[in-house]
Image (cartoon, helix red, strand yellow):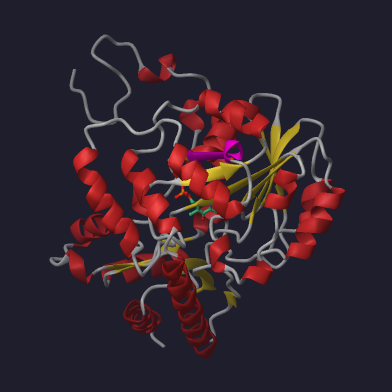
């Protein structure tokens, strides 16, 4: 018998699939932004350095130089296990956020924390409530744990918080609010969040996923940590992947009451955050200037991209984070045509938006290259 890569049948005749837990086979794969090296291989692009990636909402300025220096200094200590309790990082975050350090749990990206929430709170007979076109990872995690997904229609690509609160069922454990949301780049106002918190069933957990919140002007950032301090069932997720430019390092954190953090701690791996990530994050937190530069770069880039889309007559969703959802026609075809020319964006058919692509703000040069390539591809 010939075994092919991907076959599920084995030499003994047993089948991987029959041994798997029910439901695993029907789980969907996450479609990530295409890596540069991948695209170079597929399209025979000789110089991968000529490819630009505007596909994963990464920070075009790169990591904070202070974080890079801290990682270089930490490199010689990588034979040692990290501090499994992430003491220094939690203390630094606690000071910054004005919460106690036992309200904080760092993880391998905020995506790990979404999964840990699933381990603790989700299973058959439970549900999550989320907006239809919210971050897809909530859906994927719910499916892993056999929880149902109550998907609530959005209004003009924005979370309808009243509808989310109204969709809560007796079996609902978690309500996810991505603010700003990916892939729509829309946000809800502090006043809307406060009204939502006044109306939602206080017995369900509200998870505010604030992956891009540092990119909003301060007055547009809802004070969700206030609800953690007040002892509400609120989990706030943040990440170093976006404003801090450390997506490759995989580091995010949850802020919640100690009772919640205690449960999440029980289901995580003992060393879930690498020593390199801990060192980089502490240094990055000290580099507010880098976040300020990032905010300015994003504001300028959004103005450029949205101005060009308007001039080209392409409908777009006004953006609040470092990416724009733009309607280009046959989204997946345009995505492939751009890729052939060395520009990677993200197709959106997986989100039920086959006519859109999502593009991340790049450097000035990258934005110009993207616009020029898009014009060529669209023939305008
Ligand atoms: C990018 C992103 C994250 C961050 O994920 P990490 O695992 O921290 O890299 C979380 N939520 C949303 C909505 C995002 O777009």
Q: Which residue is depicted at the point 38% across and 44% down?
A: 278
**Quarter of the figure that contains the N terminus:** top left
Front residue (pair 228, 355):
228
The residue located at (84%, 41%) in the rendering is: 201
Q: Which residue is more in the foreground, 173 or 157?
A: 173
| Residue extending farthest left | 46
Residue 145's x, y, as percent? 58, 28
Residue 98 % position (x, y): 63, 51
Does residue 122 appear in the picture of this structure? no
Q: Write the start and end of the magenta stretch as one range.
A: 101-106
Give me the residue at 56% from left, 47% from top: 94
Could you tell me residue 330's position as x and y percent? 47, 68
Task: Note whether 53 is above or below 8 in the view shown.
Answer: below
Q: Quadrant of residue 319?
A: bottom right
Taking 272 as reference, is 182 above or below it? below
Q: Indicate whether residue 363 is drawn in magenta.
A: no
Residue drawn at x 41%, y 20% as measured from the top left: 17
Magenta stretch contains residue 105: yes
Query: Is 32 situated above or below 333?
Result: above
Left or right of 178 in this view: 42:
left
In which image quadrant can residue 316 be found?
bottom right
On the image, the x and y values in percent for residue 116 come to: 54, 32
Residue 18 shows in this picture: yes
Which is nearer the eye, 20 or 57?
57
């Amino acid at each position: 018998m010939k075994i092919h890569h991907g076959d599920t049948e084995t030499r003994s005749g047993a089948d991987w699939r029959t041994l798997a837990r029910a439901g695993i086979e029907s789980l969907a794969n996450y479609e990530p932004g295409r890596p540069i090296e991948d695209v170079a291989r597929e399209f025979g692009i000789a110089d991968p350095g000529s490819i630009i990636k505007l596909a994963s909402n990464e920070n075009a300025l790169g990591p904070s130089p202070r974080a890079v220096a801290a990682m270089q200094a930490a490199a010689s200590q990588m034979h040692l296990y990290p501090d499994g309790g992430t003491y220094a990082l939690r203390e630094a975050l606690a000071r910054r956020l004005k919460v106690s350090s036992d309200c904080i749990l760092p993880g391998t990206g905020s995506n790990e924390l979404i999964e840990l929430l699933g381990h603790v709170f989700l299973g058959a007979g439970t549900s999550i409530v989320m907006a239809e076109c919210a971050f897809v990872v909530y859906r994927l995690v719910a499916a892993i744990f056999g929880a149902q997904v109550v998907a609530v229609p959005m209004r003009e690509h924005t979370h309808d918080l009243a509808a989310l609160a109204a969709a809560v069922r007796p079996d609902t454990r978690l309500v996810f609010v991505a603010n700003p949301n990916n892939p729509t780049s829309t946000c809800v106002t502090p006043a809307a969040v406060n009204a939502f918190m006044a109306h939602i069933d206080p017995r369900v957990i509200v998870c505010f996923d604030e992956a891009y919140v540092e990119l909003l002007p301060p007055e547009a950032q809802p004070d969700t940590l206030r609800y953690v301090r007040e002892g509400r069932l609120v989990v706030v997720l943040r990440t170093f992947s976006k404003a801090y430019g450390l997506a490759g390092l995989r580091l995010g954190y949850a802020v919640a009451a100690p009772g919640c953090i205690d449960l999440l701690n029980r289901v995580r791996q003992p060393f879930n955050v690498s020593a390199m990530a801990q060192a980089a994050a502490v240094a990055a937190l000290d580099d507010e200037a880098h976040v300020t530069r990032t905010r300015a770069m994003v504001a300028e880039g959004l103005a450029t991209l949205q101005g060009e889309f308007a001039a080209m007559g392409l409908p777009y969703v006004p953006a609040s984070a470092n990416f724009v959802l733009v309607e280009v026609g046959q989204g997946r075809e345009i995505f492939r045509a751009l890729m052939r020319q060395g520009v990677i964006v993200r197709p959106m058919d997986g989100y039920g938006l086959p006519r859109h692509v999502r593009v991340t703000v790049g450097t000035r040069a990258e934005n110009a290259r993207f616009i020029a390539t898009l014009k060529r591809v669209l023939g305008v």
